[in-house]
Image (spheres, grey):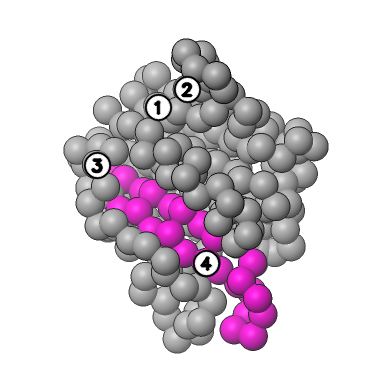
Amino acid sequence: MRETLQIGTHGRRWGLAAVALLMLVSCGPSGSRYLANQDEKVYLRVPSSWHDVLLSKTIQDPLLQATSDAKLLSKSVVSTQPNAKEQKDLDGDSPIATMSVYETTGAFNQQLSASLARRAVGLVSFDPLLPGTEDDGLSEVLDFDAAPKNAKISGSRVVYRMRNDKTSDWLLTVNLSTFFDPSKSRLYALEVVCSPECYEKSTSEINRIVSSWKIG
């Protein structure tokens, strides 16, 4: 998401991959289903009202743009935006969740850390917890969990706001979870995004979705 809200700013966009989807409808008035990569044992529960969004060939994956030491194994995008059929239709005024699984190799796999994972796959190209001088003021951390319980491997979760420049209004609020396992050459990412006003209204639902994410 970096560039105009289409969804991307400064060249950050989502990529193309084959996705293994398992849909399960649960009991309850609204219902829910699971997005899953069964081969990688990754599962995310979302409300049934969050519909699938097709990947757009014109939108590149940020990690694949940054390094050749990564392969995208799967990517799922869901949103509540009624008119969004493809990624290029997304505007950020409604919640958007993106779940990705990567195979990591070479130097990138050897150097994997929580900070590198956040820089590599997040909406912004820097670690919002540790921005450099040129990025100072472009993000504001709202919440941070150094050891979320979604998986037994190393990971982190950060919620932050971002903007294009230091004088503009906050553009989006981002909930980014990343987990990595260099021994298995895997990097997992879940990013839920929408405008600050949208995020405030949808916080409870977003937190339930993020908490439901399971790996392994």
Query: Which element type, helix, strand or loop, lies under badge 4?
Result: strand
Q: Nearer the viewer, mark 3 or mark 1?
A: 3
- Label 3: few (<14), some (14–19) or many (≥20) C-alpha neighbours in 10 Å: some
Kindly tell me whether residue 27 is visible in this rendering: yes
Residue 149's disc is 3
| Point 63% across, 28% down: residue | 49
Instruction: For marks 3 and 2, give the CA distance.
Output: 18 Å
User: Is residue 206 in the magenta section?
Assistant: no
Q: Which residue is mark 1?
A: 43
Amino acid type, label 3:
Lys
| Point 47% across, 73% down: residue | 140
| Point 31% across, 32% down: residue | 215
Q: In this rendered view, identify the residue nearer to me: 70 or 100.
A: 100
Q: Which residue is mark 2?
A: 34
Query: Are dots 1 and 4 in contact, CB under 8 Å?
Result: no
- Label 2: few (<14), some (14–19) or many (≥20) C-alpha neighbours in 10 Å: many
Q: Which residue is mark 4?
A: 161
Q: Which residues are magenta?
A: 156-181
Q: Nearer the viewer, mark 1 or mark 4?
A: 4
Query: Is residue 12 depicted above or below 127 in this figure?
Result: above
